[in-house]
Amino acid sequence: MDASALAVIEGGGVTSAEGFTAAGVHAGFRANPHKRDLALVVADEPCPTAAVFTRNVFCAAPVRRNKRVLESAVEGESCGIIRAVAVNSGNANAATGEEGLAAAEEAGRIVAEAVGCPADEVLVCSTGVIGVQLPLEPFRTGVPEVHAALSRAGGADAAAAIMTTDTVSKQCAVSFSGDAVGHLGCMFTVGGMAKGSGMIMPDMATMIAVITTDVPLTAPDARAALKRAADVSFNKVTVDSDTSTNDTCILMASGAAAPESAPFQPGSPAFQLFEAALEEVCVHLARSMAKDGEGATKLVDVHVTGACTKEDADVAARTVANSPLVKTAIAGHDANWGRIAAALGRSGAVFRQEDVDISIMGIPVCKGGLALAFDEEEALRRFEEPEIVLDINLGAGDASTTVWTCDLTHDYITINGDYRT
Amino acid sequence: MDASALAVIEGGGVTSAEGFTAAGVHAGFRANPHKRDLALVVADEPCPTAAVFTRNVFCAAPVRRNKRVLESAVEGESCGIIRAVAVNSGNANAATGEEGLAAAEEAGRIVAEAVGCPADEVLVCSTGVIGVQLPLEPFRTGVPEVHAALSRAGGADAAAAIMTTDTVSKQCAVSFSGDAVGHLGCMFTVGGMAKGSGMIMPDMATMIAVITTDVPLTAPDARAALKRAADVSFNKVTVDSDTSTNDTCILMASGAAAPESAPFQPGSPAFQLFEAALEEVCVHLARSMAKDGEGATKLVDVHVTGACTKEDADVAARTVANSPLVKTAIAGHDANWGRIAAALGRSGAVFRQEDVDISIMGIPVCKGGLALAFDEEEALRRFEEPEIVLDINLGAGDASTTVWTCDLTHDYITINGDYRT
């Protein structure tokens, strides 16, 4: 698909698509009265919605509730008709047992009452500390408040409300014209928000992302598209190899940009353009997560080519991206490619060391498994860039992938050494 | 086997067993003239020797050479008749291609000439930076010097010479009487030295360990015993999930404590006692590595019980032990068991969250997957201990294991952020 057909919406987010309002307020899940901690996204009408969830066995109560609500037969995936998504930060409602599940259900009822819809048209997500029961009082007082604040301009506040250790909020939106794909005069939009930072190595979806679109879709088609997009975006991010208990990605499709249109048909030019837009939004949000990983100073692109299989490319890139030695070397601006080689060697990917080429920021440092002389001063200069690119060619086949991560710094230790205190 | 039959030799090491001398000198692999960087261990006579090596595809030149010398048909394992083991620190001779292989061969010839044996009775190990050609001059000048210094008292110097980022040298030895196992009046010894600290998650053996014994063994029996001992010791250690390119563990058996005896027969009481001694030495050295992991302030025992299978127990314990979030929490003296639960949940081990119990330093913090109220002050006090014990019961079966790791601190970042500079 021609990416030039997509236009980035400056400052766009979860309310950029037609048919959605959102807001974010301080409800009291967190002590700091200036930190928004409850987000609400509401569709003007109930709309086809898809989700992908964590596969962590210790999956949180809201994940269990949302899976039940969406009633899917496909493991780990779900779709249905949904009106509203509420997200609280400050408490993950994970490892909280039946009491936690009851709290998630009650939170859903509180939101449904405010919105004026059945509880089963509401999804509830939680993110924050694990193993503490979810307080319901902030929902009782906060939901009416956040509902009253709903607006087309509320995307930024919603994105701020789902942050935990994130240092910046994550949102983006892209639009495309329907002119060339059979929807003359229609402008379609895909936008979303996400949170990231720690406990980030999504196995299926990621932490929490809410994406909206005004494209007309059926729920199953939305689910299939979301699964594909998550696999090349959120599922390619790793901050610290720790898959969260709460990972959830939700896509809501209002169809409001072409209210008279039938749902886009999978395979059609219109659907392909939508998929390109969805992928662009997911990749943008995913890269934002890696860039804002806990303590990170650099976004790191691990690009693997020449692998025998897609699986080999993925495991090789992921092993490099998770290596503490590689990540600390990048933090130290050290082009220590030996650590990349060692990580590749233990990854399980099939290759011969004699066939491996490695470049760091475009500087070839290893050719055929051997050290190349390179200009260390120039390498140091290139390490000043905010995005570090590692190019690895295994010389074993044609498969490739990119995994995004970040460097490992003192601040990661500081942030996680006293998270609860 | 009754562990009380084993006696720890205070200050014992690689020369505690009869029939071995050792020494360690500064040969010039490292700039600091006060850092010993070349170790030599020599048996009085050629003796049955076994080794286990890294399975990293980027395995180092000395690993490739030693495998060839030991000519084993069994992948990743080798045995033969060996007279001497030389180990240099400061250069790993990894990712150095044919030139590196030729350097390893030449180093072997230099050692053989000094010792007065065939080159194929010499093993050469290297540890240090990856991707830099091994200089031979330090061998040419250092080998005669280290050979001249060989003595029964040289074990400590040898252990010091193989250190890289280790802060303490690692050696130990245990002995047992042959009286009860058919070798009246004989006292047998197993002793060894090892290095660890960084790039430590052995997949087969570990970084570099040299173990000697005066028990009479055949080379294949030594190999089988070493493989079993490595699997429950070195292969259960992880500092940073990074498997080295140079992992090597060598066992030399002089038989000098019972020169007239036939080799111990596998399955016999004498062999079982030897295996208990070997395991004790390997576990001691392995725990020393975890305790002295780069930047570590704590040794961490991750004890998993109630797993469905041995593999599940291992993957669950290893995932917890490698979790940066768990390791930083321990560094921060934070009994944040939610991170342990999240790591278990993504490990791939089969269990239900409702069945999981977790204790930290003997304090139950999670029962049936739910938070337990506990005395945070008491937990903080127990975190003052140098060894932190995590007890995890998955409630799914009867398999169990222990994996050793360390906490993740600012010093790990500092050490690895500027290793080469």
Image (cartoon, coloured by chain):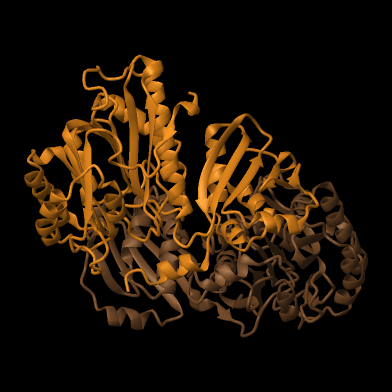
Chain colours: A orange, B brown
Q: Which of B333 and B98 is in front in this view?
A: B333
Q: Where is residue A213 in the image (x, y as percent from the top left)?
A: 30, 32
Q: How many labels does the image show?
A: 0
Q: Quadrant of the image for the C terminus of chain B?
A: bottom right
| Residue B140, picture quadrant | bottom right
| Residue A385, picture quadrant | bottom right
Q: In this view, does B337 lie to the left or right of A342?
A: left
Q: Is residue B90 left or right of residue A103?
A: right
In the displayed structure, A360 sits above or below A128; it is: above
Q: Where is residue A332 in the image (x, y as percent from the top left)?
A: 62, 63
Q: Which of A293 and B300 is in front in this view?
A: A293
| Residue pictured at 35% horizontal, 75% vertical | B361
Q: Which residue lies furthest to the top in this view?
A: A182
In the displayed structure, A12 sits above or below A306; it is: below
Residue A112 visible, this orientation:
yes
Residue B245 visible, this orientation:
no
Q: Is residue B259 left or right of residue B203?
A: right
| Residue pictured at 70% horizontal, 41% vertical | A356
| Residue pictured at 47% horizontal, 63% vertical | A295
Q: Where is residue A196 in the image (x, y as percent from the top left)?
A: 38, 52
In the displayed structure, A339 sits above or below A277; it is: below
Q: Which residue lies furthest to the bottom in this view?
A: B10
| Residue pictured at 82% horizontal, 76% vertical | B26
In the displayed structure, A393 sits above or below B284; it is: above
Q: Position of residue B300 (x, y in %)?
A: 45, 70
Q: Which of A369 and B355 is in front in this view?
A: A369
